[in-house]
Image: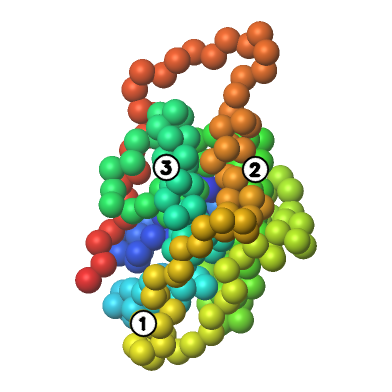
Amino acid sequence: MRTLKALSALLTYPTGELVEAVPAIRELVVSENAIASESVEPLLTQLQRDDLYDLQERYILLFDRTRSLSLHLFEHVHGESRDRGQAMVDLKAVYAAAGFEVDTTDLPDFIPMFLEYCSLLPEADARLTLSEPAHVLQAMAERLTKKESAYAGLFSGLVALAAEKPAAEAFEALVPEEDFEPNDLKALDAVWEEEEVRFGPGAAASDCGVDSLAAKVRQARRPAPGVEVASSAKPRTVFTHTAARP
């Protein structure tokens, strides 16, 4: 779905190039009709109307300085535990197996990267893959709605695209939301302190949703018995469009 690629771009750091692409993104969303255009229109309007520096500052305060709004999927389940590292390795292997080459310093669980990967899949597979982190996407939508952010509609649209809606118990696996003023540097330092690494019984994170995302994606992409799948010698696409922040 090209809509997923458009949403991927909209969730990256605002640049002049992104602003220029707004008319094309609006046309794509309307023509493909995968999600309601009302989901993205508030953000598209802001991108065209507001000063670029204001857009960039808003983005940083939301996604870079508010941990509960992190754009990294595994952050919401694993935090800074060691389990997150193995999840990264597994997800990167899934990308590589699909011919999705990553040429950026961003981590594999960066949501725009994940969405671009999903955009390469057949629609049914893309919707199924989106179901795995649907509880994270739903939590993001609700948290952004509370902040009256135009980005909320993008996450609501992603949840609507998922093949299955998140079960209530899936939200119990999420790292608790921390509410504080992003400009409070002392509070910010406290939130981003390295979490304790625990060993022994109970140390492993929940296997709910995003925790098992890579394994389930691998399973979903395995061919049925007796079905031959042509090998791919070259990457299909390269993820490079993340802009550097000041």
Q: Which image quarter is the C terminus in?
A: bottom left
Q: Which image quarter is the N terminus in?
A: top right
Residue matched to label 3: 89
The answer to whether residue 108 is visible is: yes
Gap in angstroms between the C-alphas marked 1 and 2: 37 Å
Secondary structure of residue under mark 2: helix
Residue matched to label 1: 189
Q: Give how far across and how far down residue 116 sits, in percent.
A: 46, 45
Residue matched to label 2: 127
Q: In the rendered structure, which amino acid carries the disc numbered 2?
A: Arg
Secondary structure of residue under mark 3: helix
Nearer the camera: disc 1 or disc 2: 1
Q: Residue at x 64, y 43 (%)?
A: 127
Q: Is residue 59 left or right of residue 79?
A: left
Q: Which mark is residue 107?
A: none
Mark 2, residues whose alpha carbon is within 10 Å: few (<14), some, or many (≥20)? many
Mark 1, residues whose alpha carbon is within 10 Å: few (<14), some, or many (≥20)? few
Gap in angstroms between the C-alphas marked 1 and 3: 27 Å
Q: Nearer the viewer, residue 15 or 245?
A: 245
Q: Is residue 196 left or right of residue 205?
A: left
